[in-house]
Image (tube, rainbow, N blue to C red):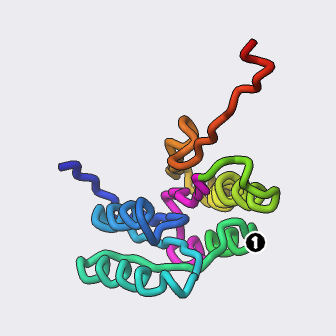
Amino acid sequence: MLEIDLSGKVALVTGGSRGIGAAITRTLCSAGARVIFTHTGSPEHASGVAALIAGIRDAGGHVEAAAVDAVDSARTADLAGRIVGQYGKLDILVCNVGKNPARPAETVTDEEWSRLIDLNLTSVFYAVRSVLPPMIDAGYGRIILVGSSAAFDGGGGAKTTLRQSPALSE
C-alpha cells in the first residue's frame, strides 16, 4: 500500500465529485490534505456530492465542495482566491474535468466541439492560471493534469466505418 503524508496541505480538485475525481478527492483527504473539489452543481448529482462529503468527513477527512463551472474563468479565479484567503495557501491543484462524447466525429456539432475544447482544455488553463500566483509566492506547488486514453485511441464508441469508393478499388 502506498503511504503519502499530505498533512497540512491544501488541495483543489476540479471535477472531483464523481468517478476518478471522487477517488482523487478521497485519496488526498485520506493522506491528510484539506481538499476543496469542484462539481457542476447539477441537482441529479447532489446526493452523490453529499455522500462523498459525508463519507470523507466520517473518516476524519477535511473536504469542501464548490459548484463552479470549470469554463468560468472569473469563478475559477475567485475560488482559488477564496481558498488562499481562508487557508493561507493552495499547495496542490488536480485538474480532472473532462468529457468525451464517445461517438463518431461526424455527429458532433460545432457548438458541441467548442464546449468540449473549453471543458477539456480551456478549463485547465483557467485553473492553472488561477493557482500559479499563490504557488509562486509560496515557492511551492504541485499541479497534476489528468488526461484520458482517448487522446491515443479516440475513446470507446467513437469508431466510424469508412467505405471504399468503387473508383479507388480498381
Going by the numbered disc 1, the residue's amino acid type is Ala
Tell me if 2 is positioned left or right of 49 in this view.
left
Tell me if 142 is positioned left or right of 7 in this view.
right
Q: Position of residue 145 (x, y in %)?
A: 54, 49
Q: Is residue 140 visible?
A: no
Residue 40, placed above or below residue 132: below
Q: Position of residue 88 (x, y in %)?
A: 53, 71
* Membership of 91 in magenta stretch: yes
* Membership of 47 in magenta stretch: no
Picture residue at 36% right of the left edge, 78% below the top: 52
Picture residue at 65% right of the left edge, 67% below the top: 70
Residue stretch rendered in magenta on the structure: 82-102
Classify residue 108 by image quadrant.
bottom right
Residue 143, placed above or below residue 31: above
Residue nearer the viewer, 2 or 70: 70
Q: Position of residue 15 (x, y in %)?
A: 53, 66
Picture residue at 34% right of the left edge, 67% below the top: 26
Residue 158, placed above or below residue 134: above
The residue wearing badge 1 is 74
At mark 1, the secondary structure is helix
Q: Is residue 121 visible?
A: yes
Residue nearer the viewer, 1 or 86: 1
Picture residue at 76% right of the left edge, 23% below the top: 166
Classify residue 154 by image quadrant.
top right
Quadrant occupied by the C terminus: top right
Classify residue 14 by image quadrant.
bottom right
Q: Position of residue 149 (x, y in %)?
A: 50, 42
Q: Farthest left residue?
A: 1
Residue nearer the viewer, 153 or 64: 153
Tell me if 161 is positioned left or right of 8 in this view.
right
